[in-house]
Image (spheres, rainbow, N blue to C red):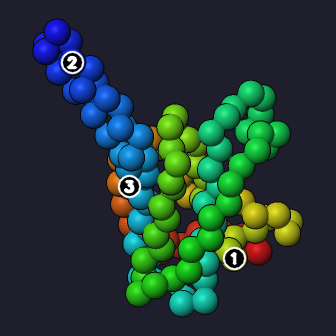
Amino acid sequence: MRVILLVVFILCQIDSFKLFAQSKAQIFVHAPVLSLVDSMKLYSQKERIVESFRNPYRTLIASNKDGIYSFELDSLDVWTWINMNLSFQKLGGIEVPNIMEEMLVEVDDSVHVKLKPKRGMFFS
C-alpha cells in the first residue's frame, strides 16, 4: 500500500511540475546597423489547416534596444510557425515577411539571429 501511495504522490508531483513548467521560446535578433526607430514584427501561428495567410496568427512587435530585438513566445504547447519582418520593408505597401520565413519553434527554443547589411534591392 505504501508503494502505491508513493507512486501516486510522485505522479502528482510530475503533473504539477508540468503544469507550472515554462512553456516559452525566445528569439533574439542582433542588428546593430539598424536605426533606433526601426521596429520588427513577429507573426506566430499554432494551427495550419490551409494556406498560412488564412489561419489565425498572433503579432508581436519589438523595438530596437541597443541593436537587439527580443521576442518571447509564451503559452507554447505545440510547434509554432513564425515569420518576421522589419517595419520599413514593404512591397506595394504590404509588409513582406523576409526574416525566418515559415520557421518552426517549440518550447525552450532560444534562437539568435545576426543581421548583416548587404548591397541589394530594398523594398519600399
N-terminal label among 1 and 3: 1
Q: Amino acid at mark 1?
A: Phe
Regarding mark 1 in the picture, which secondary structure is present there? Answer: loop
Between 78 and 102, the residue placed more toward the observer is 78
Residue 13 placement, left or right of 84: left
28 relative to 18, above or below: below
- Circle 2: is it few (<14), some (14-19), or many (20+) Cα within 10 Å? few
Q: Amino acid at mark 3?
A: Val
Q: Amino acid at mark 2?
A: Leu
Regarding mark 2 in the picture, which secondary structure is present there? Answer: helix
Which numbered circle lies on residue 111?
A: 3
Q: CA distance from mark 2 to mark 3?
A: 42 Å
Identity of the residue furthest to the top in this view: 1
Which numbered circle lies on residue 88?
A: 1
Report x, y in % for residue 122. 67, 72
Identity of the residue furthest to the right in this view: 92
